[in-house]
């Protein structure tokens, strides 16, 4: 078996990378967990709020986010092009990221955070969280399709692609 | 109160539902004066947008009188006669501030559903499935209107209820298509579909200065309405070769702007209709894009094609090669009505925009099932079945 110089360098770099990942895992167990396909490894979820950065104070977050208390950390940065402020939050103790299916059905570990971020954006921009229920409707027979849709509708505020 | 509801695929009911109440400070409660069927309702009726729950109240195009206002409402008062945009926009997010109201970040309380479909959610819409927010519709005596300062507009004296009704959806959807497609003076514009939205897109293009506007359909009564009430030219696609006629009309160039106002259940006389129908029924595609394909082939090089009809998901045999090689601009949108309604009401006040002719059949809520049946099958020349809850 022979190794080229490039191969040796590549092998060495891979070994160093493995050591770094091992150290990170020991120091911060949640840091090295895969976040799931389509999710950033950092675990940050973000919304862009049409407010000046000075108007989005992470020390006084809107109620939907503040209610999560010490479970989350938040950060802000200006959005480019006059789009306002990027408000990001993530769970401090990051469990393994959910699968795409779990995210789309609002059953992933970040589901509550996703909903809270959206609601915080509504409070900052429109001043209140928009309510849709109770909406007038007629009789709802318990058909399989109807029950499935109802279940998805219930989790839809927490569901998302990221 | 009595309401017209979706009961299942191709099933419409009339049943008792609770009256709406104010839930947010920016709400109003409206006593509905008139509420019309819309071609996009047929996609719900046919089960092509599978996010309806039995008992959902239908209707998204309406006008009426304010009977209750929330604490945060500043523009409207009890007794005001208003028309309401079918899409719900907060007016405060970046999209609303750009005039892209149908893309509102905050108007859809169920964003997870459309995020799964399209990558991002768009705004909410009255009576248009749980994917669009689960908002109750307007085929009822009363409706709750959120973000009312943004979406409700006072109707000028002298504009009838029957005319103002179509400032809710058909007219601003037409304006969205013509304006966002970039219609300019001296353009030749072709519009596929002579329903309410197609007619309004044609009229908008004319008022924006288009040199020549041609509307394509197969129903004689609708084409007659276009010639009589809109003032545009017409082509019957069952009688003529549309791309050939359009080339002749434009000196071989093709229209500068092609607006598709048909949507996901398009018809055509050729074999591609059968192909699309089979694929749609087998759920191998969700939408039938016949008119979009023709618009792309007919459009002049470097022109713009605008998809204004409602599409939900995936289509097959899409002529992307023509889009790329002919350097076309392809755009689409739901309506950004809050941006266009003020000018539409001005046009209505000046008699430059007449819409009453669209309301071919006005009836009570009790006739809801019959109205949708007539509208779907184009019976008795039905262009729009309109419900008057107070009747």
Image: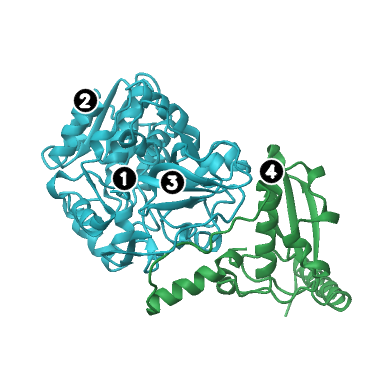
Chain colours: A green, B cyan
- Pointers 2 and 1 within a single chain: yes
User: Which tag is nearer the camera, tag 4 or tag 1?
Assistant: 4
User: Which tag is nearer the camera, tag 1 or tag 3?
Assistant: 3
Q: Count the labels in the image.
A: 4
Q: Secondary structure at mark 4?
A: loop
Q: Are marks 2 and 1 in contact (CB under 8 Å)?
A: no
| Residue on which disc 1 sits | B292
Give x and y (percent) for residue B253.
28, 27
| Residue on which disc 3 sits | B86
Give x and y (percent) for residue B65.
43, 41
Q: Secondary structure at mark 2?
A: helix
> Does residue B284 show up?
no
Badge 2, how many Cα within 10 Å: few under 14, some, many 20+? some
User: Which tag is nearer the camera, tag 2 or tag 4?
Assistant: 4
Q: Quadrant of the N terminus of chain B?
A: bottom left
Give x and y (percent) for residue A81.
69, 37
| Residue on which disc 2 sits | B249
Q: Closest to the observer: B4 or B88? A: B4
The numbered mark, 2 or 1, whose residue comes first in the sequence reads 2
| Residue on which disc 4 sits | A50
Q: Secondary structure at mark 3?
A: loop
């Amino acid at each position: 078996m022979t190794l080229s110089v490039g191969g040796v360098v590549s092998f060495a770099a891979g070994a160093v990378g493995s050591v770094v990942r091992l150290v990170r895992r020991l120091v911060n167990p949640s840091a090295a967990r895969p976040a799931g396909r389509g999710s950033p490894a950092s675990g940050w979820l973000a919304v862009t709020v049409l407010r000046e950065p000075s108007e989005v104070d992470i020390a006084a977050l809107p109620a939907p986010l503040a209610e999560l208390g010490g479970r989350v950390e938040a950060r802000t940065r200006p959005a480019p092009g006059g789009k306002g402020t990027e408000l990001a939050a993530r769970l401090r103790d990051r469990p393994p990221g959910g699968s795409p299916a779990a995210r789309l059905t609002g059953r992933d570990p970040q589901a509550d955070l996703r909903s809270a971020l959206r609601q915080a954006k509504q409070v900052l921009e429109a001043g209140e969280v928009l309510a849709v229920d109770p909406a007038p409707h007629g009789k709802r027979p318990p058909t399989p399709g109807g029950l499935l849709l109802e279940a998805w509708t219930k989790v839809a505020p927490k569901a998302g692609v990221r | 109160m009595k309401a017209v509801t979706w009961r299942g695929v191709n099933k419409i009911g009339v049943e008792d539902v609770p009256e709406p109440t104010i839930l947010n400070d920016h709400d109003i409660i409206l006593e509905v004066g008139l509420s019309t069927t819309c071609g996009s309702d047929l996609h719900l009726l046919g089960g092509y947008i599978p996010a309806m729950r039995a008992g959902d109240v239908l209707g998204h195009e309406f006008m009426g009188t304010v009977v209750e206002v929330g604490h945060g409402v500043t523009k409207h008062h009890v007794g005001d006669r208003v028309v309401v945009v079918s899409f719900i926009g907060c007016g405060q997010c970046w999209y609303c501030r750009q005039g892209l109201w149908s893309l509102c970040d905050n108007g859809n309380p169920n964003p997870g559903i459309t995020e799964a479909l399209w990558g991002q959610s768009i705004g909410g819409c009255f009576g248009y499935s749980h994917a669009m927010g689960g908002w109750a519709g307007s085929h009822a005596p009363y409706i709750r209107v959120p973000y009312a300062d943004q979406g409700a507009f006072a109707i000028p004296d002298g504009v009838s209820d029957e005319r103002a009704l179509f400032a809710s959806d058909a007219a601003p959807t037409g304006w969205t298509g013509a304006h966002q497609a970039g219609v300019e003076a001296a353009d030749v514009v072709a519009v596929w579909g002579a329903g309410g939205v197609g007619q309004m897109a044609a009229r908008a293009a004319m008022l924006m200065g288009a040199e020549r506007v041609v509307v394509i359909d197969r129903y004689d009564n609708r084409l007659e309405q276009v010639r009589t009430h809109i003032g545009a030219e017409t082509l019957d696609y069952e009688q003529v070769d549309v791309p050939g006629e359009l080339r002749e009309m434009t000196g071989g160039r093709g229209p500068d702007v092609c607006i598709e106002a048909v949507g996901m259940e398009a018809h055509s006389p050729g074999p591609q209709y059968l192909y699309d129908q089979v694929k749609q029924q087998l759920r191998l595609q969700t939408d039938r894009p016949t008119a979009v394909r023709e618009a792309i082939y007919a459009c002049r090089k470097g022109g713009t094609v605008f998809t204004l009809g409602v599409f939900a998901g995936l289509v097959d045999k899409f002529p992307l090669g023509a889009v790329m090689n002919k350097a076309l601009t392809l755009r689409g949108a739901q309506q950004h009505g809050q941006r266009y309604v003020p000018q539409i009401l001005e046009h209505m006040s000046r008699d430059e925009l007449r819409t009453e002719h669209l309301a071919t059949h006005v009836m009570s809520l009790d006739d809801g099932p019959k109205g949708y049946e007539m509208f779907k099958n184009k019976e008795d020349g039905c262009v729009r079945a309109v419900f008057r809850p107070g009747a």
